[in-house]
Amino acid sequence: MRKPGKALLRIAAGCLLLITATGAHAAVPQGIDGPINLLLVGIDPRGTHTIPLADSIIVAHIPADRDGAYLFSLPRDLVVRIPAFAPSGTAAERRKINAAMALGSVTPGRDPSAEQGYELLSRTVGQVTGIAKFDAGAVVTFGGFTKIVGALGGIRMAIDQDVVSEHRRPDGTARDRLPECRGDHNCLRPYTGPQKIYPKSDKPVRLEPWEALDFLRQRYGLPRSDYDRQRHQRQFLTAVAKKLRKHPEKLASVISAAGKDLTFLGGGHTAAAWAAELKDIRITEVRSIDLPGSALFERGKYLGEKLPPATGRFFTAVAQDRVASFLIDHPGVVTVDGWPPRPRPQRP
Protein backbone atom coordinates (compact mmCIF):
# COMPACT_ATOMS: atom_id res chain seq x y z
CA MET A 1 0.00 0.00 0.00
CA ARG A 2 1.39 3.39 -1.01
CA LYS A 3 1.62 6.19 1.47
CA PRO A 4 -1.12 8.85 1.07
CA GLY A 5 -0.36 12.36 -0.04
CA LYS A 6 1.82 11.38 -2.98
CA ALA A 7 -0.29 12.75 -5.83
CA LEU A 8 2.16 15.37 -6.99
CA LEU A 9 2.04 17.36 -10.15
CA ARG A 10 5.55 16.33 -11.11
CA ILE A 11 4.78 17.18 -14.72
CA ALA A 12 6.13 20.70 -14.97
CA ALA A 13 8.07 19.68 -18.05
CA GLY A 14 4.77 19.10 -19.80
CA CYS A 15 4.54 22.85 -20.20
CA LEU A 16 7.24 22.52 -22.86
CA LEU A 17 4.33 21.64 -25.10
CA LEU A 18 2.49 24.86 -24.26
CA ILE A 19 5.13 27.60 -24.44
CA THR A 20 7.48 29.49 -26.70
CA ALA A 21 10.65 27.40 -26.72
CA THR A 22 14.19 27.86 -27.89
CA GLY A 23 13.18 25.89 -30.95
CA ALA A 24 10.36 28.29 -31.74
CA HIS A 25 12.11 29.56 -34.84
CA ALA A 26 12.27 26.10 -36.35
CA ALA A 27 10.09 25.39 -39.36
CA VAL A 28 6.58 24.34 -38.39
CA PRO A 29 6.48 20.59 -38.99
CA GLN A 30 3.99 18.94 -41.27
CA GLY A 31 1.25 16.94 -39.62
CA ILE A 32 0.71 19.02 -36.46
CA ASP A 33 -2.57 20.68 -37.27
CA GLY A 34 -6.16 20.68 -36.10
CA PRO A 35 -7.09 20.24 -32.43
CA ILE A 36 -4.39 18.75 -30.18
CA ASN A 37 -4.76 16.62 -27.08
CA LEU A 38 -1.78 16.07 -24.78
CA LEU A 39 -1.50 13.66 -21.86
CA LEU A 40 0.74 14.82 -19.00
CA VAL A 41 1.57 12.25 -16.33
CA GLY A 42 3.35 12.41 -12.98
CA ILE A 43 4.78 9.26 -11.40
CA ASP A 44 6.55 8.54 -8.13
CA PRO A 45 8.75 5.47 -8.62
CA ARG A 46 10.74 4.38 -5.57
CA GLY A 47 13.70 3.40 -7.72
CA THR A 48 14.34 2.10 -11.23
CA HIS A 49 13.07 -1.35 -10.27
CA THR A 50 9.77 -0.10 -8.85
CA ILE A 51 6.54 -0.33 -10.83
CA PRO A 52 5.18 3.25 -11.05
CA LEU A 53 1.61 4.43 -10.49
CA ALA A 54 0.24 7.48 -12.27
CA ASP A 55 -0.21 9.89 -9.37
CA SER A 56 -1.15 12.87 -11.57
CA ILE A 57 -3.09 12.67 -14.85
CA ILE A 58 -3.74 15.92 -16.71
CA VAL A 59 -5.19 16.31 -20.21
CA ALA A 60 -4.39 19.49 -22.14
CA HIS A 61 -6.76 20.23 -25.01
CA ILE A 62 -5.62 22.85 -27.52
CA PRO A 63 -8.28 23.96 -30.04
CA ALA A 64 -7.56 23.99 -33.75
CA ASP A 65 -7.59 27.80 -33.71
CA ARG A 66 -4.85 27.71 -31.00
CA ASP A 67 -6.88 30.18 -28.91
CA GLY A 68 -5.59 29.14 -25.51
CA ALA A 69 -5.84 25.69 -23.94
CA TYR A 70 -8.02 23.72 -21.54
CA LEU A 71 -6.57 21.64 -18.71
CA PHE A 72 -8.51 19.02 -16.79
CA SER A 73 -7.45 16.28 -14.38
CA LEU A 74 -8.71 12.74 -14.05
CA PRO A 75 -8.80 11.61 -10.41
CA ARG A 76 -6.03 9.08 -9.83
CA ASP A 77 -8.57 6.96 -7.90
CA LEU A 78 -11.15 6.99 -10.72
CA VAL A 79 -12.51 3.44 -11.08
CA VAL A 80 -12.32 2.38 -14.73
CA ARG A 81 -11.97 -0.63 -16.98
CA ILE A 82 -8.29 -0.97 -17.88
CA PRO A 83 -7.95 -2.83 -21.19
CA ALA A 84 -5.79 -5.89 -21.76
CA PHE A 85 -2.27 -5.00 -22.89
CA ALA A 86 -0.21 -7.49 -24.84
CA PRO A 87 3.24 -5.87 -24.36
CA SER A 88 3.01 -6.35 -20.58
CA GLY A 89 0.92 -9.50 -20.71
CA THR A 90 -1.79 -8.03 -18.45
CA ALA A 91 -5.47 -8.86 -18.71
CA ALA A 92 -8.36 -6.39 -18.69
CA GLU A 93 -9.55 -5.52 -15.22
CA ARG A 94 -11.60 -2.99 -13.27
CA ARG A 95 -9.30 -0.90 -11.10
CA LYS A 96 -8.33 2.64 -10.21
CA ILE A 97 -7.00 4.43 -13.27
CA ASN A 98 -3.57 5.10 -11.75
CA ALA A 99 -2.89 1.36 -11.95
CA ALA A 100 -2.88 1.50 -15.77
CA MET A 101 0.58 3.05 -15.71
CA ALA A 102 1.84 0.28 -13.44
CA LEU A 103 0.27 -2.56 -15.41
CA GLY A 104 1.52 -1.23 -18.73
CA SER A 105 5.07 -0.63 -17.54
CA VAL A 106 5.74 -4.29 -16.77
CA THR A 107 8.60 -5.68 -18.87
CA PRO A 108 9.46 -9.21 -17.71
CA GLY A 109 13.12 -9.52 -16.87
CA ARG A 110 13.81 -5.80 -17.26
CA ASP A 111 13.20 -2.55 -15.39
CA PRO A 112 9.72 -1.04 -15.78
CA SER A 113 9.21 1.05 -18.92
CA ALA A 114 7.62 4.49 -18.43
CA GLU A 115 6.99 4.76 -22.16
CA GLN A 116 5.18 1.42 -22.24
CA GLY A 117 3.19 2.32 -19.13
CA TYR A 118 2.20 5.59 -20.74
CA GLU A 119 0.81 3.68 -23.72
CA LEU A 120 -1.62 1.65 -21.61
CA LEU A 121 -2.54 4.69 -19.53
CA SER A 122 -3.24 6.71 -22.66
CA ARG A 123 -5.50 3.95 -24.00
CA THR A 124 -7.34 3.84 -20.69
CA VAL A 125 -7.75 7.62 -20.53
CA GLY A 126 -8.91 7.47 -24.15
CA GLN A 127 -11.66 5.02 -23.22
CA VAL A 128 -12.84 7.33 -20.44
CA THR A 129 -12.72 10.56 -22.44
CA GLY A 130 -13.43 9.41 -25.97
CA ILE A 131 -10.10 10.83 -27.18
CA ALA A 132 -9.09 8.21 -29.73
CA LYS A 133 -5.36 8.98 -29.58
CA PHE A 134 -3.22 11.54 -27.79
CA ASP A 135 -1.01 13.60 -30.07
CA ALA A 136 1.85 13.83 -27.57
CA GLY A 137 2.60 13.49 -23.89
CA ALA A 138 5.14 13.62 -21.11
CA VAL A 139 5.94 11.59 -18.01
CA VAL A 140 8.01 13.11 -15.23
CA THR A 141 9.10 11.64 -11.91
CA PHE A 142 9.16 12.96 -8.36
CA GLY A 143 12.88 13.74 -8.65
CA GLY A 144 12.40 15.48 -11.97
CA PHE A 145 9.86 17.82 -10.47
CA THR A 146 12.19 19.35 -7.89
CA LYS A 147 15.00 19.59 -10.46
CA ILE A 148 12.75 21.48 -12.87
CA VAL A 149 11.52 23.95 -10.27
CA GLY A 150 15.09 24.44 -9.11
CA ALA A 151 16.21 25.20 -12.68
CA LEU A 152 13.44 27.80 -12.86
CA GLY A 153 14.74 29.46 -9.68
CA GLY A 154 11.47 28.76 -7.89
CA ILE A 155 8.00 29.66 -9.07
CA ARG A 156 5.44 32.37 -8.30
CA MET A 157 1.76 31.54 -8.05
CA ALA A 158 -1.35 32.68 -6.21
CA ILE A 159 -2.59 30.53 -3.32
CA ASP A 160 -6.37 30.27 -3.58
CA GLN A 161 -7.01 28.87 -0.09
CA ASP A 162 -5.16 28.27 3.16
CA VAL A 163 -3.18 25.03 2.88
CA VAL A 164 -1.56 23.30 5.86
CA SER A 165 1.24 20.85 5.18
CA GLU A 166 0.87 17.28 6.36
CA HIS A 167 4.54 16.55 5.72
CA ARG A 168 6.77 19.56 6.49
CA ARG A 169 7.66 21.81 9.39
CA PRO A 170 7.76 25.59 8.79
CA ASP A 171 11.52 25.38 8.11
CA GLY A 172 11.03 22.69 5.47
CA THR A 173 12.32 19.74 7.46
CA ALA A 174 10.23 16.58 7.67
CA ARG A 175 7.69 16.31 10.48
CA ASP A 176 8.18 13.57 13.06
CA ARG A 177 6.28 10.33 12.77
CA LEU A 178 3.94 9.23 15.51
CA PRO A 179 5.54 6.54 17.68
CA GLU A 180 2.95 3.98 16.63
CA CYS A 181 3.63 4.73 12.95
CA ARG A 182 7.42 4.46 12.94
CA GLY A 183 8.32 1.73 10.53
CA ASP A 184 4.65 1.32 9.55
CA HIS A 185 4.01 2.74 6.07
CA ASN A 186 0.30 1.90 6.22
CA CYS A 187 -0.53 4.64 8.76
CA LEU A 188 -3.05 7.00 7.17
CA ARG A 189 -1.77 10.21 8.81
CA PRO A 190 1.49 9.31 10.55
CA TYR A 191 2.96 12.74 11.29
CA THR A 192 3.02 15.02 14.31
CA GLY A 193 4.47 18.41 15.31
CA PRO A 194 4.54 21.96 13.85
CA GLN A 195 3.29 22.35 10.28
CA LYS A 196 4.22 24.54 7.33
CA ILE A 197 1.31 26.79 6.32
CA TYR A 198 0.66 28.31 2.89
CA PRO A 199 -1.73 31.24 3.54
CA LYS A 200 -4.29 32.28 0.97
CA SER A 201 -2.91 35.05 -1.24
CA ASP A 202 -4.50 36.64 -4.30
CA LYS A 203 -1.09 38.03 -5.21
CA PRO A 204 1.45 35.48 -6.50
CA VAL A 205 3.92 34.31 -3.87
CA ARG A 206 7.31 32.76 -4.54
CA LEU A 207 7.71 29.08 -3.74
CA GLU A 208 11.09 27.42 -3.39
CA PRO A 209 11.41 23.99 -5.06
CA TRP A 210 10.68 22.14 -1.79
CA GLU A 211 7.74 24.43 -1.06
CA ALA A 212 6.22 23.91 -4.50
CA LEU A 213 6.54 20.15 -4.13
CA ASP A 214 5.10 20.21 -0.63
CA PHE A 215 2.23 22.55 -1.52
CA LEU A 216 1.14 20.38 -4.42
CA ARG A 217 1.08 17.24 -2.26
CA GLN A 218 -1.52 18.52 0.17
CA ARG A 219 -5.13 17.34 0.30
CA TYR A 220 -5.92 16.78 3.98
CA GLY A 221 -8.00 19.59 5.46
CA LEU A 222 -9.05 20.94 2.07
CA PRO A 223 -12.80 21.23 1.38
CA ARG A 224 -12.66 18.93 -1.66
CA SER A 225 -9.60 16.91 -0.73
CA ASP A 226 -7.88 15.51 -3.84
CA TYR A 227 -10.00 17.65 -6.18
CA ASP A 228 -8.57 20.80 -4.62
CA ARG A 229 -5.10 19.30 -4.98
CA GLN A 230 -5.76 18.60 -8.67
CA ARG A 231 -6.75 22.24 -9.16
CA HIS A 232 -3.55 23.43 -7.48
CA GLN A 233 -1.56 21.18 -9.80
CA ARG A 234 -3.20 22.71 -12.88
CA GLN A 235 -2.62 26.22 -11.52
CA PHE A 236 1.03 25.39 -10.99
CA LEU A 237 1.41 24.02 -14.51
CA THR A 238 -0.03 27.25 -15.89
CA ALA A 239 2.35 29.31 -13.71
CA VAL A 240 5.35 27.37 -15.04
CA ALA A 241 4.20 27.83 -18.63
CA LYS A 242 3.84 31.58 -18.08
CA LYS A 243 7.30 31.84 -16.53
CA LEU A 244 8.94 29.99 -19.39
CA ARG A 245 7.05 32.10 -21.89
CA LYS A 246 8.49 35.18 -20.20
CA HIS A 247 11.97 33.65 -19.80
CA PRO A 248 12.46 31.22 -22.72
CA GLU A 249 16.21 31.26 -22.08
CA LYS A 250 15.55 29.05 -19.05
CA LEU A 251 14.16 26.23 -21.17
CA ALA A 252 17.52 24.63 -21.94
CA SER A 253 18.43 24.43 -18.26
CA VAL A 254 14.98 23.03 -17.44
CA ILE A 255 15.34 20.25 -20.00
CA SER A 256 18.88 19.52 -18.84
CA ALA A 257 17.80 19.44 -15.20
CA ALA A 258 15.00 16.98 -15.90
CA GLY A 259 17.35 14.54 -17.64
CA LYS A 260 16.22 10.92 -17.39
CA ASP A 261 13.43 11.92 -15.04
CA LEU A 262 11.49 13.20 -18.05
CA THR A 263 10.07 10.96 -20.77
CA PHE A 264 8.80 12.98 -23.72
CA LEU A 265 6.51 11.30 -26.25
CA GLY A 266 6.08 13.52 -29.27
CA GLY A 267 4.03 11.33 -31.56
CA GLY A 268 6.81 11.35 -34.13
CA HIS A 269 7.78 15.02 -33.60
CA THR A 270 10.51 16.52 -31.43
CA ALA A 271 9.90 18.84 -28.47
CA ALA A 272 11.31 21.70 -30.55
CA ALA A 273 8.84 20.94 -33.34
CA TRP A 274 5.97 20.98 -30.89
CA ALA A 275 7.18 24.25 -29.39
CA ALA A 276 7.32 25.77 -32.88
CA GLU A 277 3.77 24.69 -33.61
CA LEU A 278 2.35 25.91 -30.31
CA LYS A 279 4.38 29.08 -29.89
CA ASP A 280 1.40 31.36 -30.55
CA ILE A 281 -0.93 29.88 -27.95
CA ARG A 282 -2.23 32.58 -25.64
CA ILE A 283 -0.99 31.48 -22.22
CA THR A 284 -3.35 34.01 -20.61
CA GLU A 285 -6.22 32.00 -22.07
CA VAL A 286 -5.33 28.68 -20.44
CA ARG A 287 -8.46 27.47 -18.64
CA SER A 288 -8.47 25.05 -15.74
CA ILE A 289 -11.50 22.72 -15.77
CA ASP A 290 -12.75 21.08 -12.59
CA LEU A 291 -14.60 17.78 -13.11
CA PRO A 292 -17.37 16.98 -10.57
CA GLY A 293 -16.10 13.66 -9.25
CA SER A 294 -17.41 11.94 -6.13
CA ALA A 295 -16.84 8.84 -4.03
CA LEU A 296 -17.87 5.43 -5.41
CA PHE A 297 -19.29 2.96 -2.90
CA GLU A 298 -20.40 -0.60 -3.54
CA ARG A 299 -21.97 -2.66 -0.75
CA GLY A 300 -20.92 0.05 1.68
CA LYS A 301 -17.25 -0.17 0.70
CA TYR A 302 -15.33 2.75 -0.78
CA LEU A 303 -13.78 1.65 -4.07
CA GLY A 304 -12.49 4.93 -5.46
CA GLU A 305 -13.92 7.86 -7.39
CA LYS A 306 -16.54 8.21 -10.12
CA LEU A 307 -17.65 10.88 -12.56
CA PRO A 308 -21.34 11.65 -13.23
CA PRO A 309 -22.79 10.63 -16.62
CA ALA A 310 -23.12 14.29 -17.63
CA THR A 311 -19.32 14.55 -17.72
CA GLY A 312 -19.48 12.44 -20.87
CA ARG A 313 -20.98 15.42 -22.70
CA PHE A 314 -17.93 17.49 -21.80
CA PHE A 315 -15.60 14.74 -23.02
CA THR A 316 -17.55 14.62 -26.31
CA ALA A 317 -17.05 18.38 -26.68
CA VAL A 318 -13.31 17.90 -26.17
CA ALA A 319 -13.14 15.15 -28.78
CA GLN A 320 -15.13 17.29 -31.22
CA ASP A 321 -13.12 20.47 -30.48
CA ARG A 322 -16.06 22.55 -29.30
CA VAL A 323 -15.18 23.12 -25.66
CA ALA A 324 -15.66 26.90 -25.71
CA SER A 325 -19.24 26.70 -26.96
CA PHE A 326 -20.02 23.79 -24.66
CA LEU A 327 -18.96 25.74 -21.57
CA ILE A 328 -21.26 28.59 -22.61
CA ASP A 329 -24.23 26.40 -23.52
CA HIS A 330 -23.96 23.92 -20.63
CA PRO A 331 -23.02 25.79 -17.44
CA GLY A 332 -22.68 23.58 -14.40
CA VAL A 333 -21.62 20.35 -16.11
CA VAL A 334 -18.03 21.25 -15.25
CA THR A 335 -16.54 24.24 -13.44
CA VAL A 336 -14.09 26.62 -15.06
CA ASP A 337 -11.17 27.35 -12.71
CA GLY A 338 -12.89 25.25 -10.02
CA TRP A 339 -13.49 28.10 -7.61
CA PRO A 340 -15.11 28.56 -5.15
CA PRO A 341 -14.67 24.98 -3.97
CA ARG A 342 -17.74 22.87 -3.33
CA PRO A 343 -17.73 21.06 0.04
CA ARG A 344 -17.33 17.35 -0.49
CA PRO A 345 -19.09 14.81 1.76
CA GLN A 346 -16.67 13.08 4.08
CA ARG A 347 -16.20 9.33 3.75
CA PRO A 348 -17.72 7.35 6.60
Image: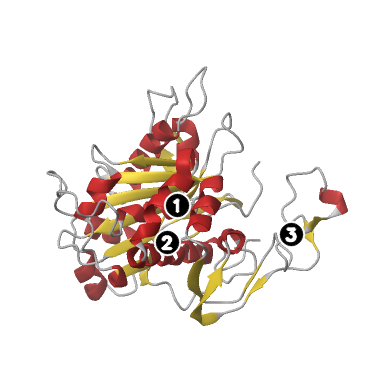
Relative to residue 114, is residue 145 depicted above or below? Answer: below
* Res. 297 visible in picture: no
Residue type pointed to by label 2:
Leu
Q: In the visual, does 336 lie left or right of 140?
A: left
Badge 2 density bin: few <14, some 14–19, many ≥20, Cα 10 Å = many
Which residue bears the numbered disc 3? 173
Rendered-image quadrant of the N terminus: top right
Residue at 42% x, 67% y: name it: 239
Asked if labels 3 and 2 touch by Cβ distance under 8 angstroms, the answer is no
For label 3, the SS is loop
Which residue bears the numbered disc 1? 11
Badge 3 density bin: few <14, some 14–19, many ≥20, Cα 10 Å = few
Disc nearer the start of the sequence (1/2): 1
Q: Nearest to the eye among marks 1 and 3: give it.
A: 3
Relative to residue 44, is residue 109 depicted above or below? Answer: above
Residue closer to the observer: 252 or 265: 252
